[in-house]
Amino acid sequence: MTAVPRRVRSALFLPASNPRAIAKLASLACDIAILDLEDSVAPDRKVEARAAAIATLATGGRPLVVRVNGAGTTWAADDLAALRDAGAAAVLLPKVDGPADVAAARAALGTDGPPLWAMIESARGLLALPALAEAAAGLRLAALVAGTNDLALDLRARPDAARTPLLPALAQIVAGARAGGMLALDGVLNATDDPERLAAECAQGAMFGFDGKTLIHPAQIATANAAFGPDAASIAWAEAVIAAFALPENDDKGAIRLDGAMVERLHLAEAERIISLARA
């Protein structure tokens, strides 16, 4: 099993039933690719898509996540059974409403099966975020993914370009992920021909604290990688903080002044995280 990389700025959905899309995997600059068995695959091609995903995993190479069909569908149990030992870096569960959904998938995959990711796509899922965070370690739940399209429908929201009605939900998803020690990935943007809106959404997601963004087109990868990676200013700040705390006179200090601002050891931890991500 190939592990998910430490840094996931871009997570690209690819229909597992589309061999032309799968053939491009090696050339894609996304941090992770998600082979989709759910929304992007027609019902009459579900079995074919599952077989294609398993075959792709068997080739090895870059780590791959697989999104299975939702609990209660005709294909869900067979999807999980097929992925138990197939080598997926993680299994993405759609429409997770609470820990019970994750526990059922963990039971099907086994305690030593691949890690789980959960999509938050409903009001129930939002209300269950504290419980999901509490259960994350025991269930090996490693990421929360904002399913913004379905979430808007379930909330009967009418998002504008700034996603105004979804902003409280996005903040809750990030908080749930941080509380449970999980990755937090922002939802997709369907408008693949609007680079300015994509850049704005990526900047907004990074501001909210998401680690990266889920994508539906290769043309979106570079924008996401740029937005969610540490920029030159952040790296310079982090290097300065680390260097300052490394001085002998600051060895026993909990807080110091740096460039006119008070910097505490919690900032040192953040600086070390930024440098670690930059090196990754």
Image (spheres, rainbow, N blue to C red):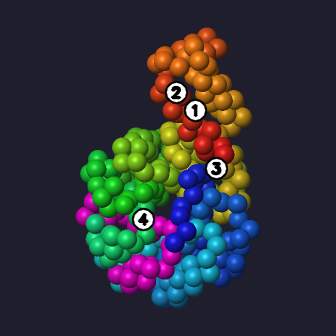
Q: Which residue is mark 4?
A: 115
Is 93 covered by the magenta stretch?
yes
Quadrant of res 12: bottom right
- The three-letter amino acid code for the residue at tag 1 is Ala
Q: Which residue is mark 1?
A: 271
Q: Could you tell which of marks 1 and 3 lies nearer the N-terminus? A: 1
For residue 43, above or below residue 5:
below
Q: Which residue is mark 2?
A: 267
Camera-side residue of 30 and 269: 269
Cα–Cα span, label 3 and label 4 = 21 Å
Image location of residue 91, percent across then percent down: 45, 69
Q: Residue 214: give its label.
A: none
Cα–Cα span, label 1 and label 3 = 14 Å
Which residue appears at 61% of the width and 28% of the height?
242
Is disc 3 placed on a helix, strand or loop?
A: loop
Is 143 covered by the magenta stretch?
no
Is disc 4 placed on a helix, strand or loop?
A: loop
Cα–Cα span, label 1 and label 2 = 6 Å
Cα–Cα span, label 4 and label 1 = 28 Å
Residue farthest along the right direction in this orientation: 27
- The three-letter amino acid code for the residue at tag 3 is Ala
- The three-letter amino acid code for the residue at tag 2 is His
Q: Which residue is mark 3?
A: 280
Q: Residues within 10 Å of mark 4 (few under 14, many from 20)?
A: many
